[in-house]
Image (spheres, rainbow, N blue to C red):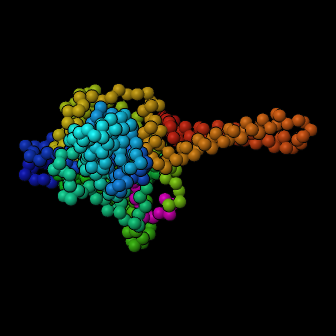
């Protein structure tokens, strides 16, 4: 079955299965990857005291807080002097970004304000154009920092003409909206298409996500046919419909869906109550480089909001990271296999005959028809994927999430401190018993201190394992689930 296509129409109705992904005829519209806003990080995970190294579309960026202008700035992460990374620098006492290689300082406009090696009575070399840093347009929306990946002067005031995609639920005060972020060892294409794929949830995340019971259960996991349909596919993305709600892909980064909780659960409550119980998925997928991507997520809901207010964010992230880890290895290998097959397009490598793959196929059709089939890296990369690291490094949580999450990083430091305190208490208790003379302490007190030492030591060992599994590495073996 081939897809109906009309070169003169910007929108199309797609009925899966869709086996033909290439558009018929000559398509004039082409998606410009460098003329759109990209999410960088939630601002709750950005420390105003230090510069941060981030990468978007292969561009090395430094994010820092300009306290003089009271806003976040995004610069090219390169000092014009000797090309040292500014992200390894500091913010000086005057609120300027300082390169720690030779002390050059820059204000929020990218102008060099100080070259310590230049004589005060000499020519003002710090004012030369060559001493300036490239500045990228940036803004904050939905408490997320966004960047426009084109520093051409014509885009200096692009925020006045084009704003980042607006997701109303992220600004609705009746919804909770805790956020998280993580770096992944697979590309943007694999990340976003699998977030659009609910059919894999009962299998790849078995035991981690509650799954509704189908009318006819064909296996233990509860997989079933899904009624999914893609509508209005154009250069800006597509709208989708499924049995339990609606979905939207806003090119190039955002996929969000609305789920009617009571319809999904089959709850017998009034229509008024149903209209007030909504759960949303907001996924932002950032192309970093070939084989690497960044994921920013939020799960807004307008029920049980009090839970999100009293439970620390890192506790939610433990469960969410476990879900992400359970199919991380699958996606990494999947991407490498597609590359190894050297298929001219995704369709040649994958067989997608059912409606449950409608959104995945819709995204691949958008990518082929408007996006050029792959992310445009502007020739910075050859297209080859980085080699696969060992499994423990591949599924590492600390460097891909904890260090860049304010809540998890704080919790990790606190728990490590508690671990050391428990070990210290254990050693001190045994030490007191060992050095105290027999007549100076009763047997009851001695037994109590020995018991305390054992309890503290056991607790420290348990805590060390807890920290390792939840903040560093937690493998997931599907065969034993």
Left or right position of 139 against 316: left
Residue drawn 20% across and 52% down?
Answer: 156
Left or right position of 244 against 440: left
Q: Quadrant of residue 344?
A: top left
Residue drawn 37% across and 54% down?
Answer: 67
Residue 180 in percent (x, y) is at 42, 49
Residue drawn 82% across and 37% down?
Answer: 433
In the image, residue 274 sits, relative to residue 141, either above or below, namely below
Residue 140 in percent (x, y) is at 32, 56
Give the farthest residue toward the right.
Answer: 439
Residue drawn 68% across and 38% down?
Answer: 423
Towards the viewer: 408 or 388: 408
In the image, residue 103 sits, relative to residue 272, either above or below, namely above
Q: Which residues are magenta?
A: 295-308
Towards the viewer: 263 or 95: 95
Towards the viewer: 277 or 315: 315
Left or right position of 261 against 166: right
In the image, residue 157 sits, relative to residue 289, either above or below, namely below
Q: How many marks?
A: 0
Q: Is residue 298 magenta?
A: yes
Residue 446 in percent (x, y) is at 84, 40
Q: Is residue 383 magenta?
A: no
């Amino acid at each position: 079955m081939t897809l109906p296509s009309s070169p003169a129409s910007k929108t199309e109705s797609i009925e899966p299965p869709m086996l033909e992904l290439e558009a018929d005829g000559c398509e004039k519209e082409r998606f410009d990857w460098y003329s759109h806003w990209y999410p960088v990080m939630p601002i709750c995970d950005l420390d105003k005291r230090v510069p941060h190294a981030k990468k978007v579309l292969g561009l090395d960026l430094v994010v820092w807080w300009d306290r003089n202008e009271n806003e976040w700035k995004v610069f090219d992460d390169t000092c014009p002097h000797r090309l040292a990374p500014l992200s390894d620098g500091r913010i000086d006492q005057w609120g300027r970004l300082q390169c720690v290689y030779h002390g050059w300082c820059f204000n929020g406009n990218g102008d060099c304000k100080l070259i310590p090696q230049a004589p005060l009575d000499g020519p003002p070399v710090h004012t030369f154009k060559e001493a300036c840093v490239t500045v990228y347009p940036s803004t904050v929306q939905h408490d997320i920092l966004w960047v426009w990946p084109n520093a051409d002067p014509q885009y200096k005031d692009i925020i006045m003409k084009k704003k980042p995609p607006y997701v109303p639920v992220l600004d609705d005060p009746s919804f909770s909206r805790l956020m998280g972020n993580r770096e992944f060892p697979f590309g943007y294409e694999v990340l976003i298409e699998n977030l659009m794929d609910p059919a894999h949830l009962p299998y790849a995340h078995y035991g981690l996500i509650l799954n509704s019971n189908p009318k006819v259960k064909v296996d233990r996991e509860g997989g079933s046919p899904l009624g999914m349909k893609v509508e209005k596919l154009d250069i800006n993305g597509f709208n989708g419909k499924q049995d339990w709600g609606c979905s939207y892909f806003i090119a190039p980064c955002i996929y969000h869906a609305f789920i009617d909780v009571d319809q999904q659960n089959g709850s017998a409550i009034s229509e008024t109550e149903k209209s007030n119980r909504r759960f949303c998925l907001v996924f932002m997928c950032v192309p970093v480089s070939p084989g690497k991507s960044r994921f920013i997520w939020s799960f807004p809901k307008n029920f049980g909001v009090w839970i999100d207010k009293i439970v620390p964010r890192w506790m939610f992230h433990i469960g969410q990271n476990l879900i992400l880890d359970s199919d991380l290895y699958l996606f990494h290998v999947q991407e490498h296999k597609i590359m190894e097959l050297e298929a001219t397009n995704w369709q040649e490598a994958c067989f997608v005959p059912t409606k449950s793959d409608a959104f995945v196929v819709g995204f691949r059709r958008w990518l082929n028809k408007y996006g050029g089939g792959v992310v445009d890296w502007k020739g910075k990369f050859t297209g080859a994927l980085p080699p696969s690291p060992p499994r423990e490094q591949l599924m590492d949580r600390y460097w891909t999430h904890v260090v860049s999450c304010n809540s998890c990083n704080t919790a990790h430091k606190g728990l490590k401190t508690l671990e050391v305190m428990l070990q210290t208490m254990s050693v001190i208790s045994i030490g007191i018993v060992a050095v105290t003379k027999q007549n100076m302490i009763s047997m009851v007190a001695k037994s109590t201190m020995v018991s305390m030492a054992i309890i503290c030591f056991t607790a420290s060992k348990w805590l060390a394992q807890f920290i390792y599994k939840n903040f560093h590495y937690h493998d997931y073996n599907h065969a034993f689930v």
